[in-house]
Image (cartoon, helix red, strand yellow):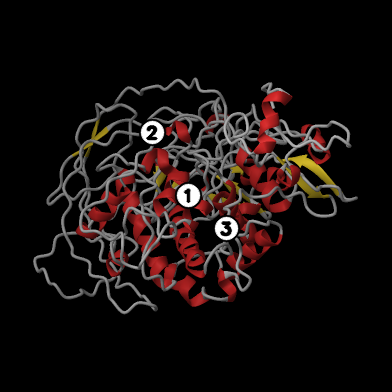
């Protein structure tokens, strides 16, 4: 085990000694002197213990944080106790008659004997349509049910099946709230800036990759392609990661120099954001391919399957939820212990835990919270989970209730500090009147922990009403709020650069997705904090009265006018870290890449650096409201 403890020092452990070295795992062991003196291993708890069947073999887990090879793991089934056999998750016992799908990190919870999947018990198609009335293929209710069944069939740690019924419902509410946010309410199968302007010719899809300031958001048209003049498109592929750690990168240029496909690239060759959590980057596609299909080539050869196959569009989100780890935990584990904030920390903690106050992500958090509350209400939960796992999220929750942007949360009591599934809970404890003290974490708001920086929906702004009433108001949702014209003056900023020096590590990325933009972006974001104040345009959203089948209260939305935020400071971007399965993916709406940059040198879950777009100054308009920059901030690795 790497340290030397003599037989004499260990002898007293057999007589009940509890201090050193008897209190250290594996330093001393019980040897039957009638048997050969051999490495004791870990008994029944070691990796691949009992992996002795004729069709069983101990192999490496390619989806682990520190991958071990099949040859290194082969000795574990013979009792080897040192690396990699002594590290959880590096090796596993594969039955060669079945697909080679590695196990998911265990939650430690048991599955109740009468546990059923959501589609077979407490989640209906009507509730799905209530949550996402404008959802489009591949996000279907039937596809969701099939993806859950398929994943659970091949994994002992099952999604939405572990723990009590309340825990299972809480996990589903957290999953639906997050994936609805990431996929633009289940409307974005593909990332908009990378493939919003697309064509299908002879059965093949072609995409026109675009920069944020050259994209017509209302009509999904790219005015100038990123691959014009045969410029190479090198986004979302890290050449240093090759099979089995990443799909092979190809040199991608426009399909034709003239004609209808000028400026377009083949969609099947690019690893941009797709699916429920916008899977992106070549190293994440190969990991998802292992987890969902048992083979690396499935998604490497045809990444479009994640956008065109409902089983994989949902499955890619399930893969991230169950297997992408950050700080030793997963979204699955955080949801089961009752911490919605912990799920966001895994998905996008680097940018939203906490978020820059008044910035885009500050608004995005509130939209995510409201979607989560909507799902929780539809599932009949009488309380929502704590938000301690994400620094600053309680503050966002309070602001959300105050400014009326979280109407679905008004029917729930305020969550407390404690996770609702840990310790004694009497049904009311933990809901105090004062804001809870935020948990202390070492996470940084910088993008080096694997988070993504691109928003996918316009922030919610509510116009102040002349009449305030204490009774529930009837409101109506509109997807395209009217916008006032702004005057943009010509002014430019010199771009700032960022040098990446971190060693590669693997991470899953975190996309965010919110509502679709309906107008050209009002300004571009810069990396420097010297940006002048911007007065955004004023527009209003009339919210629809929530439909809650399983609650009797009607949330009240008090219209107010938000104050103008401080100048927005663009989050620093950098390449992905190496196998730390942290944040998921890219956002469907937002990828402002003014110029393609070389593939990042490290695997973090954030966006590659790129030349920022010109700075613009917007003249204030009457009655300005606070609006953060439009989606399309930067490319986020997944």
Q: Secondary structure at mark 2?
A: loop
Give the spatial CA distance, label 2 vs label 3.
30 Å
Residue depicted at x 18% and y 59%: 463
Which mark is first along the chain, 3 or 2?
3
Q: Secondary structure at mark 3?
A: loop
Q: Residue sitting at 24 percent across and 43 percent down?
A: 358
Q: Is residue 97 left or right of residue 14?
A: right
Q: List x then y, in percent, for residue 20.
A: 59, 29
Indicate which disc, 1 or 3, sits on the residue closer to the N terminus. 3
| Disc 2/disc 1 C-alpha distance (Å) | 24 Å
Q: Is residue 4 visible?
A: yes
* Residue 109 badge: 3
- Disc nearest the viewer among 2 and 3: 3
Q: Are marks 1 and 3 in contact (CB under 8 Å)?
A: no
Give the number of the disc on residue 444: 2
Q: Report which residue position mark 1 lands on.
A: 588
Q: Could you say where residue 477 lies in the image, as x and y percent from the top left?
A: 31, 68
Q: Is residue 606 above or below residue 512?
A: above
């Amino acid at each position: 085990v790497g340290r030397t403890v003599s037989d004499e020092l260990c002898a007293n452990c057999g007589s009940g000694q509890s201090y050193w070295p008897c209190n250290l795992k594996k330093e001393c062991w019980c040897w039957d002197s009638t048997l050969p003196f051999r490495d004791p291993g870990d008994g029944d708890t070691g990796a691949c213990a009992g992996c002795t069947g004729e069709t069983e073999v101990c192999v490496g887990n390619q989806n682990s944080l520190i991958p071990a090879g099949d040859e290194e793991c082969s000795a574990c089934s013979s009792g080897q106790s040192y690396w990699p056999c002594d590290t959880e998750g590096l090796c596993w016992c594969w039955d060669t008659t079945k697909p080679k799908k590695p196990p998911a990190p265990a939650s430690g919870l048991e599955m109740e004997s009468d546990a059923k999947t959501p589609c077979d018990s407490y989640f209906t198609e009507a509730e799905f349509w209530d949550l996402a009335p404008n959802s489009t293929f591949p996000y279907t209710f039937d596809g969701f049910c099939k993806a859950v069944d398929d994943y659970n069939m091949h994994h002992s740690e099952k999604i939405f099946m572990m723990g009590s019924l309340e825990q299972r419902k809480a996990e589903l509410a957290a999953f639906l709230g997050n994936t609805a946010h990431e996929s633009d309410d289940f409307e974005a199968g593909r990332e908009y800036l990378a493939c919003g302007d697309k064509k299908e010719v002879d059965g093949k899809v072609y995409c026109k990759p675009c920069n944020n300031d050259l994209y017509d958001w209302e009509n999904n048209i790219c005015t100038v392609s990123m691959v014009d003049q045969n410029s190479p498109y090198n986004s979302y592929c890290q050449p240093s990661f090759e099979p089995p750690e990443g799909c092979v990168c190809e040199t991608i240029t426009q399909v034709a120099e003239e004609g209808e496909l000028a400026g377009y690239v083949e969609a099947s060759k690019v690893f941009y954001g797709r699916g429920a959590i916008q899977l992106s980057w070549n190293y994440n596609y190969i990991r998802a391919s292992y987890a969902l299909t048992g083979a690396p080539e499935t998604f490497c050869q045809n990444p479009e399957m994640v956008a065109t196959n409902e089983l994989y569009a949902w499955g890619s989100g399930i893969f991230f939820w169950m297997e992408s780890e950050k700080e030793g935990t997963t979204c699955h584990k955080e949801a089961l212990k009752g911490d919605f904030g912990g799920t966001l920390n895994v998905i996008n903690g680097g940018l939203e835990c906490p978020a820059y106050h008044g910035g885009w992500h500050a608004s995005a958090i509130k939209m995510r919270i409201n979607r989560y509350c909507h799902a929780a209400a539809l599932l009949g939960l009488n309380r929502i989970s704590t938000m301690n796992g994400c620094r600053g999220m309680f503050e966002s929750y309070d602001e959300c209730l105050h400014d009326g942007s979280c109407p679905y949360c008004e029917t729930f009591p305020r969550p407390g500090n404690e996770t609702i599934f840990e310790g004694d809970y009497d049904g009311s404890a933990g809901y105090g009147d004062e804001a809870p003290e935020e948990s202390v974490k070492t996470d940084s708001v910088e993008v080096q922990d694997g988070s993504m920086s691109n928003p996918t929906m316009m922030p919610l702004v509510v116009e102040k009403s002349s009449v305030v009433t204490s009774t529930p108001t009837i409101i109506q949702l509109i997807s395209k709020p009217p916008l006032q014209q702004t005057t943009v003056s010509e002014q430019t900023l010199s771009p700032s650069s960022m040098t990446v020096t971190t060693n590669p590590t693997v991470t899953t990325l975190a996309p965010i997705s919110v509502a679709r933009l309906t107008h050209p972006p009002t300004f571009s974001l810069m990396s420097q904090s010297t940006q002048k104040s911007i007065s955004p345009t004023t527009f209003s959203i009339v919210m629809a009265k929530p439909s809650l089948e399983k609650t009797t209260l009607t949330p009240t939305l008090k219209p107010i006018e938000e104050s103008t935020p401080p100048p927005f400071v663009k989050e620093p971007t950098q390449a992905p870290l190496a196998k730390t399965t942290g944040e998921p993916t890219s956002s469907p709406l937002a990828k402002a890449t003014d110029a393609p940059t070389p593939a990042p040198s490290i695997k973090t879950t954030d966006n590659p650096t790129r030349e920022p777009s010109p700075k613009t100054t917007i003249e204030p308009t009457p009655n300005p409201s606070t609006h953060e920059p439009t989606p399309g901030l930067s490319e986020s690795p997944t």
